[in-house]
Every structure is written in structure tokens, then in C-alpha cells.
Image (tube, helix red, strand yellow):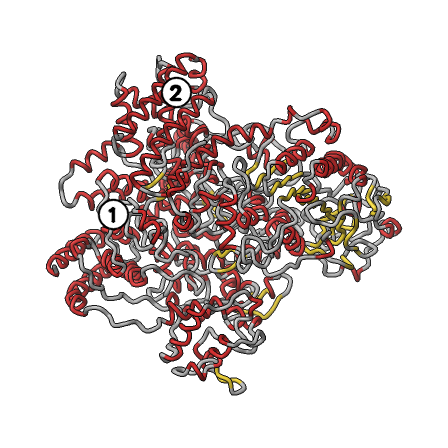
Amino acid sequence: MFPDPCQQWTRRAFLGRGAFGVGAMGLASLLQENLAGKALAAPSLRGGGGVLHYAPKAKRIIFLFMSGGPSQLDLFDPKPKLNEWNGQPMPASLVKNERVAQLQGQPLLCMGSRYAFARHGQAGVEISELLPWTAKMADDITVIRSMQTEAINHDPAVTFMQTGNAQPGRPVMGSWLSYGLGSHNRDLPSFVVLVSGIGKGQNLHTRYWGSGFLPTVHQGVQFRSSGDPVLFVSNPPGMSSEVRRRILDGVRDVNQQKLDVVGDPEIATRIEQYEMAWRMQTSVPDLMDNSKESASVYDLYGEEAKTPGTFAANCLLARKLAERDVRFIQLYHRDWDHHDKLPDAIGSECRHVDRAGYALVQDLKQRGLLDDTIVVWSGEFGRTPMSQSSTSYDTYGRDHHMKAFSSWVAGGGFKAGGLVGATDELGFSVVHDRVHVHDFHATILHLMGIDHTQLIYRSQGRDFRLTDVHGQRLPILLA
Amino acid sequence: MEAVYHTKLVEWLTLTTRIVLPLRRAARAAGILARLSVVVAGVGDVVAAGLEPRRAVDFDREIRPILSDHCFACHGPDEGARKAGLRLDTRDGVLATADGVTAVVPGRSEASALMHRVLADDEDEVMPPPQSGNSLTTRQIEKLRQWIDEGAEWRGHWAFETPVRPALPTVGDVDWVRNPLDVWVRERLEREQRVPQAEADARTLIRRLSLDLCGVPPSPDEVEAFLADQNDRAYGALVDRLLASPQYGERMAQMWLDLARFADSDGYHDDTPRSMWRFRDYVIHAFNANKPFDDFTVEQIAGDLLPNATVEQRMASAFHRNGPTSSEGGADAQEYAAKYAVDRVNTTASTWLGVTMQCAECHDHKYDPFTTREYYQLFAFFNQVPENVLERTLHVAPVMAAPTPEQEAAVAVLTRQVEEFEQAMTSSAPERSAEAELKTQLAAAKQARDELVRSIPQLRVMADGPEVQPTHILVRGDYRTLGEQVSPGVPASLGKLPAGLPPNRLALARWLTDPRHPLTARVMVNRLWQMIFGVGLVKTAEEFGSQGERPSHSELLDWLAVEFVESGWNVKHVLKLIVTSATYRQSSKISPEWLERDPENRLLARGARFRLPAETVRDNALTIAGLIDRARPVGGPSVKPYQPGDLWREFAYGDSADKAYVRDTGADLYRRSVYTFWKRSILYPSYAVFDAPNREVCTARRPVTNTPLQAYVLLNDESFVEAARVLAQNVMAGHPGDFAKQLDRAFLLALARPPSAAEATAMESLHHDVLAVYSDRPEEAAQLLAVGDFPLPEGADAVRLAAWTCVANAILNFDETITKE
């Protein structure tokens, strides 16, 4: 293997170097093994008496983000009363002074669901006919009906779900974990993002996997389904791997000479990063190549998984990334924003995600990875019990709703098979076991072995946390 | 020794005079000269004064940080969070007696409740509470005891007191000193028993200066000319030339636009395009013209409110229309109007005050004397804009026509023509045929004028509505919960608005630029220091409050701040002081011992060495390759250089062709990076990889990371592959058939120096090996050479050019190439 020029420098020297005192990141960065985790975690996890505050239940997270806000009332939270009152005004006592988005200034009418629900699994959790595959794994997942957020428009709500704050500028959960725990991967970044539903629905911002005020080494790296899987990873046309290696050797020779003269450890780091880049030129395309997967894999994930850029293909990639110990795997699936003609749209969305989500959980389980992998399925918010654009069961839509929505979680120390929380009989508000986004974050961090009040970064003279000054871990969600 | 020192200072004085005198404020300049003589006269006294006696506890440096970190959260400025009515952030609070208990009795630690509580054994008694995880160390407790026993001296936080010019200290090695900055640096080094590095060689210095001041490397001719110039003044002359170069303004704008959160798209939600480039032109021209920083400030905060505001002054006020905006359907206009005002308050605070105000949006600041009420008093300056909060259009009102000077002149000419024709029509009764002729001419002139006027770029600018809108505190930052009504004002701890002015943005700007303002000058000189040395004298450039880091050299910071104000807020003057100092001119070589002791080089015992900023990384490569567009004058609209695939469409709302990234061609591909279209939701990828911010919020400091993704950009991004190929073309054309000379030239272009023997061997061997590969597979050579639009030379030998392109690709990837040495 390549000699490690870093060894001639003490770690302390590394730690202190760089504009933020995190030149360490150069070394630690995306890339190195536990050294990074320790080096980074020590200053951040205050009072933890070590890297982690608890024995972690989970080592990694796969977050299936349903961008746009799926309708919980048509998927996970049946409300017969809404059907009974379909077209009637919502009770003023419920909706008075409550925020709506596109329904501003419009009548607020009850809207039932056109879909049938049935009980599934040992706990008899009601799940919509739209999600037959999810229903089959009712014993593996916990449905949370009492999610709550604080932003009512897409961009701020996605930002809130990712960073604990609706304003841009803060690190997302994946970045916090990369910062807090480092990477345990030599060949891949610690935080990888996969996007599906391109060309549909709400737009994306790189900030949704941005590191905010944390050093940019903690930002997510998008693995793309077309073109370069990682931007610029491929050599230019006409430059073979052999030539590339020869150039890298030349660069390394000159950099090594410079290091000998100047003594700046940043040069040692750069030498190491070029070697990492070289390794990733092999490991990333290898990973992205699904063609070597066995037929049984496609039996599980379905044919769609053969098409790059689909949610199914990304779920398969997520499993492979989990196997390779990537810490945070973020999937974005777009096009859940069903303001009108919801029945036309939601069925096809469900077909894209239902089986693949099921397959991912089963695949992880079969490979013994589910126990220490958290899987989360959630939008940025839910949808209103009130109709938008029509009260017809064929063409109705629903507006954004932040006071109650549904998500599911599986693996990694989360409770398996059951239901948490409940909403009122019209599905407007949470009536018990509220899971605020801050609580959700606190609980996830807990399972990763971190006390959310102690994962801290000082920026602009202030200590910041993923959970701001809020949040509590919720034992009710835990196995 | 003293005599030498005097000579140095007199030398420096002359240098200063040269820069200062051309200032528009002759009166001020005269003032500086008078003051400088005082400095010179004072040197003897300082030298005679000798060493200071043993130091007592320094409240501001040693005690306030303890109180701030461990006590203020519950016993500080935030009234809502205050426990037991005890307040430890003011002298009155500390000395107050309640229920017969006094926190601090000066001179008597044993009688001070504070000491009892920090020393208590009982878990319920001891402070800070153990569960806070914030306990004091024995050393901190000892410091508190010493402070109380020494009389509990209390001073305001250093950064909130007007800086005064400190007397120069004594240094042993006065020969080393080139200007007063060095006196502070050297004095500190001597205290640490440390000698500075030797001066860097001339090649390193000219490259360092060019990259620092202009953001581009020197040409080999410039390097040779500098080496050949034996005049003592060669260095100063070089600095003057660089500061006078138009590239200087572009480089400075790069820094300023992060603060101004300047971008070409709206930011929130769909991130639709906006057209703000005339503001960037303003910034570039302001730096190039060395506009005094106080004027620069006033114009950006309140240019629209200046009496008889010029086009330029009104354009400057676009500063506060740069914040992100939304046009999301279903958004609440009131909520976003509040967000925009919050962004303006926070940005103003970060940019000029160097403090983080945003905590006070929801509650009184926990560490610094800023209340929520004061936050909304600032808010009240910025929520008066009659804007269509959620409008989706390129030009959201209020907008202005922002003609370039050329357009302005051309419009004037055409307007005059129109008038002349009109006059001719009316004054004399023309003959029928002449009248027809005149009519045609008039119509043509009118049409030309109207077309020109229509082509004048529009710019979103600030304005205040006709009537003052009332402002309420938004309770806990919630735009729907209105609290007490407040009037515009500034934090009491930082002075008062100037008397006799209406309390609007103009008054706010005048307050910011009051020479006695404790922060504005310090914050700006610190920024300049950070730009040059990588780390500011105050490392937390965005936070000068009690939670920020103390300056590494407080007196130097204050000296520079006062110098800045007294020079007429002369930015070039301060930069010249910095880069002509001996401190700056040191070699950046690092000794292992000092790497351990001072890894960040806060003591400045060596020259700064750090990776170039994102834009400079690209400009550097374009310049080395000779591609950079130097033909066009500075300024102009944003451009879209190479970008892989169609990232914009992948990220866009829905899918439509108009969301595509349509890259430019020709010279636009090689425009300096400051002109690259800055899309917030998906920043130009190679800049994002090199730590440029997306500019959704004001950014005072970029991180400097070192990652494999950076390697990919330099190795494989079309811009850099093309630059390598064109560099290869150029050096091959310059010295046909002579690899050694070609390599020399390439090194001179990239590093301002020839290769060492070992480097030359490494590159020759690389060249030899890849030449063999491409000789075997010439079709690959052709493929490689097809990257990039720039034409290939006639009859190029593809195999040889491809091999050289690989060498050039290596050169553009050297750590040294992307590093300021």
C-alpha cells in the first residue's frame, strides 16, 4: 500500500491547522477511518466522556425522503369521519387561526379518502390499499401518526426536517453525524445522497445535504444516476486509467518534494486525498454498477430497479452503501405534492416507492444489517384533511399540513411492528404521543449513541445543535 | 539602534504619504501627517519605558470569558432566562446585594457569594450546576478569586469600546521592522522567545502579492521585471501597480460578495433567476476607485436616501435586495416580509458590526448586551421596503434603471439629438422636403434612444415607503405574535443614532461610520487581515462579541483600526501597510517545533500559506493557460462557463427546457470567476467543492478544506482539462522541440519559478511514459485534445500535444499551484 506521509506529523498539529482549526478535516474528512471519528468527535461531544454517550444501537441511517409531502390521510392515518363529513366545513374550533398554505382565504371543507384501509401485522396497524408491500412488512416497521413540524412551505419544511431549523445555513443531520462520528469508510464518503423523480415535483437545493456552518467536508456527496456518478470522477475522454495513475505519481513526487522543504501538513493531507480520489475512481463506479446483481435481487426489488435513477434502483444502491458502511444514506424521491388530482398521482408514486421500500428493509434484514441500520420514511410535512381544488373523490387534492403527519421507521433500535401516536378524529391535530421533528432528531441521535444536547458546534459565537434548544428522545419509539 | 528605527519609520512615513496624499480628503491627510510625527517622537519614550511589571488579572481577557462561558446563559443579558434575579454581565449586577447576599465584594473573595457557590460541595449549591456539564476548572476558580481580591476591576467588553491608538512597544530587533505593524508582531514574538522566518525570495513574493491583491498569478515577464529591478522601492512600486490594476477590484469583490450574499438567483423554493450584476459592478468599481469605506458603507446601507443620490449611490443600495426571496405558492407574504427584514438585520450585523445578532430575534442575547427590543429596533430600519414580497419575476420592485457609464453617455447623446431635431422642426418653418427629412431623422433618433433605454439593465434597489410602517416586536420571532411597538434605533451598548437626522437607514449608516464607532473599523481591518493571512487577528471574524475569540494582537488591531479611520477609511492604504510589512514578507516555511506550538500561525512567526479561494483556483488555471479573458473591461453580466451535464434541470422544479443550463461560448468561458452565474440552489460545482458558500446567508469566513473531490475538479473538470491542453499548446509553440525549455516556461507560468532538478526529472519521466502510451494509441490522444472549445493549433502533433497535456494536467494539480506560498 501507499506509504502514509501523514505519520510524520503529530495529530495535534493536524487538529490545529486550517482556517477553522479543523484542518484535521483534511485528514479526517470524508475519508479516513476511526481516527477521524475520534479526532472530530472529541471536541464536539462535550461532557460525553468519550466518543459516544451511549452504546449505539445503530451504525448507519438510510433516510427515504418523500419530497413534497405525502398524504398521510390516504396512506397511514384513516379517518372515516372525514368521509362521513365529506364536503362539510371543518369545525371552526379546529381550524381557527391555524395556518394553511394554498388554502389561504378559501373555504376549509372536510375531504375523506377514496382508499380502503385494512389491518396488518400482529399489531393490526391500518395501512392503505395503496401500499400493499409496506403492509406486508407491518411487523418490521413502526408507523408514527403523530409527526409534527413547524414550517408550512416546502423549502423551509425540508430545511427544517433536515437541519432542525427552517432558515438556510445550518448543517443537515447527515453532516452532523459525519462531524460527530467521522467516517468509518476508507473508500467512500460518509454521507451519500441519491435522488429519484428527476424532472418532477419540487426542486432540490444542494443545501438539503449541505454542511451549513460545519466544514464542507461534512456535506453529502450526491451519487448521480446519469453522467459522472460523482461529479468529475471520470477521467477525461482519451485518458486511460494507466495514464491517470502515471500523472498522479508525478503529482505525488512533486508534492512530496514540496512537503520535505516547506513542512506544511496540508501537503501531506493533499497527497493522501489524491490517493483517496484514485481509490474512489474504482469504488464508486463499482458500487453504482447494478448489473452484477443476481436475479433474486430483482425478484425482490422489482424490474424498476434495473433502471438507474429510479427509487427502486436507489434503494438497491442504499443497501450496497450500507454494506460498505457509509454512515448516512439520503434518498430523495420527488413528486408527492398533490394539491389537486391526488388520486391520479398518488397511485403511481406509491408504485414507485412501495415495493422498493419493502425490498430494502427485507434485504437489510436478510443480510443481518437491519439491526444496526435505521430506515426512515418521511416527507417534510403531511397534507390537510381539507380538500383543495375539489371535493370529488376522483379529483380532490390536499394542501400542506404541518400539525400532523405520518412517517415510518425501522431497524437500528427502533420499535418493530406497531403504531405510535394518534390524531383527532378528523386528522387535524395530534392528540397523543406527539413526535415533533426535534424529538425525532433527538431519538435518532440517541440510537446512534449520541446525546443530542451534547452534539455541539460553536459558530458565530454561539453553540449550535441539530435540535437547537429543543427536543427529547422518545422512549416510546424504541425497541 | 534607535536611529535605525527612526529611519525605518520615516521611510514608512514617506510611503504612507505617497498613498495617503492622493486621497480626496486633503484635510484628513494633513491630519495624519501631523499625527505620524507624534508617533515618531514617541518612539524614544517607549524604548525608555522598559518592561512592564508583573500583570494583575486582566478582567476582559481572563475573567469575562469565564463569566460569559459559564454564567451568562442563566445570569446574563437575557431577562427571560435569568435565574434568581442575579445578573453577572454588568458591574451593578455583580455588586448588587439581594437578601443580604452579595455576589462579589471587591477585595474580599471570602465574603463573596460567587466564590462560595463555585466552591460549594453540595450538588444543589455548586455553580454552575453539575448537570449543565459546564463546571469550572480549579484554575478558573483561582482566577476568579484573584480578580475579586485585586478589587474586582470591571471593564466593558473590549470590542464595544472605541479603539484608541496604542503607543508602540519596544522591540529588540528594530532592523527587522518595516512598519508599525511589525513592532507589535515582533514584540509578541520576542515575548515568546521566537524569531521570525527569513524573508521569502522575490519570486515567491511577487506571486504571493499578485494572488493576494489581484487574485491572479504574475506573468513570467512581470516576474523577470521584478527580479531585475534592483531599486529599493521596487517592492513598494509593485504593490502600487497591483493595487492600481483593475483586477484588484475583482479580487476584492470576490471577498465582499460573500458578505453581501450576492447571487444571480432568488434562493428559496424554485430559485428563479434575478438580475443583480450591476451591484457587482458597483462593488468592483468602488474597490478599484478606492472609495473610502465610510462612503462605501453609507451607499450600500442607504444610497437611495442620500440627498440628490447619484445612479451609482442608488445602485449601491441593492446590497440589501440581495437576500434570498421566495415566490412559493401558498407562502404567507407577511412571514416572508419578516424573513427579509431579519436577513437584513443579521447581514448588517455580521458585515459591519462583526456580531451575531440573530439570537436576539427570539430572546435577549445570552452573552452580549443586545435585547430583543433592540433587535426589532434595527428591524424597523429594514421593513419599510414597498416590495412585492412573493413576486416571481426578474425585477421585483422597487427597481431602478442602472445604466453603465457608456449607456448613460450614449443616452445623453441621443437625447440631445432628439432635442435638436425637435427644435429644428419647431424653430424655423422648414420647407416641405426638409421637414420630411427631419421627421425621419427624429423618428430614427427617438427609436435609437428608446431601444437603448430599454436595454439598460434593471436592478432591485432599496426604498422606503411614503409612510413609516409601525414595527412590533415579533414575540419569539413569530411573525403572527405582535408584541410591543418599537421605533428604529441602535443597541444602547454601541452608542446612539446621530442627533438631528430622521431615524432611518441613512441615520443608521451614519452611526455605523462614525469614527468613534467601536466595531466598524476593527471589523473591516480584521477582514483585510484575514484575507491576507488566512486567519484574522480576531479569528472569529463574524463574532467580536464576548463569545468570539480575543484578538491575537489587540493593540495591533486597534492601531490598524484607528489608522484606517484616520486615513479616511482608506482600504488600499491598510492593505499596503499589511503587505509591505516584514511580517507579510516572511517565508512560509514551517519548522516542526513551531508547527506543534502554533499550528495556525497566530503569532505570525512565518508567512501565511494556504490554498487559494475557489474562484482564484479557477482564475489561476485560466491565467496560467493564457485563456483568461483580459480583453474586456471589468464589469458586466454573469456568465455560464463549462458545467457537466444539465445539473440545473436535474434540480429544477418540474421539467422544462427553460430550466436548462445553457453554457456560454467564446470569451465568456474564460471570464474571471467573480462573473460566474451564482445559482444558490446548485452552486457552480467546482466552486462548491472548493468551499465557496451558496450565499443564502452572509458569510464572513470560508472554511479551507482539502478533499478528494477537489482532486477531481483539478484533474477532470472540462475547464481544467482544457486549461492543461492550452498551456501545453502554448509552451510547445514557444520552444518547439525543447522539452526542458517548455517545462521551464510552464513552471514560470504556474509557479513563477523554474523547476528544481528533481521536479524536472519527475516531469520528464512522466512525459516520456505518457508519450509512449499515446504513441501506441493515437486515437486516445485525439479524444483528449477534443476537450474544450478552444481551437487546436494548425497541424498539431496530437500524440505529442496529448503527452504534454498530461504534464500540464499534473502541473495544474501541484499543491503549490493552488496554494499561496
> Amino acid under label 1?
Gln
Is residue B500 visible to us here? no
Label 2 Cα crowd, 10 Å radius (few <14 / some 14-19 / many 20+): few
Q: Find residue B791 and name its label.
A: 2
Mark sitting on residue B449: none
Q: On the rendered structure, is A261 left or right of A17?
A: left
Asked whether residue B720 appears in the rendered view, the answer is: yes
Q: Chain of mark 1?
A: B
Identity of the residue furthest to the bottom in this view: B100
Compared to residue A363, the image places residue A70 above or below, namely below
Chain bearing tag 2 is: B
Task: Decide which of tag 2 and tag 1 comes sooner along the chain.
Answer: 1
**Residue at the spot x=62%, y=61% of the render?**
B478
Give the residue at x 72% y 24%. A295
Residue, disc 1: B586
Residue under the point 41% across and 83% down: B108
Q: Give residue B804's quadrant in the image.
A: top left
Instruction: Report crowding for label 1: few under 14, some 14 to 19, many 20 or more residues within 10 A (C-alpha).
Output: many
User: Which of the image's four quarters has the N terminus of chain B?
Assistant: bottom left
Determine whether, in the image, residue B688 is placed left or right of residue A96. left
Instruction: Tell me residue A395's x, y (percent).
Output: 80, 40
User: Looking at the picture, how far across and down is residue B506, in whole percent?
Assistant: 42, 61
Q: In terms of depth relative to the viewer, which is nearer, A217 or B255?
A: A217
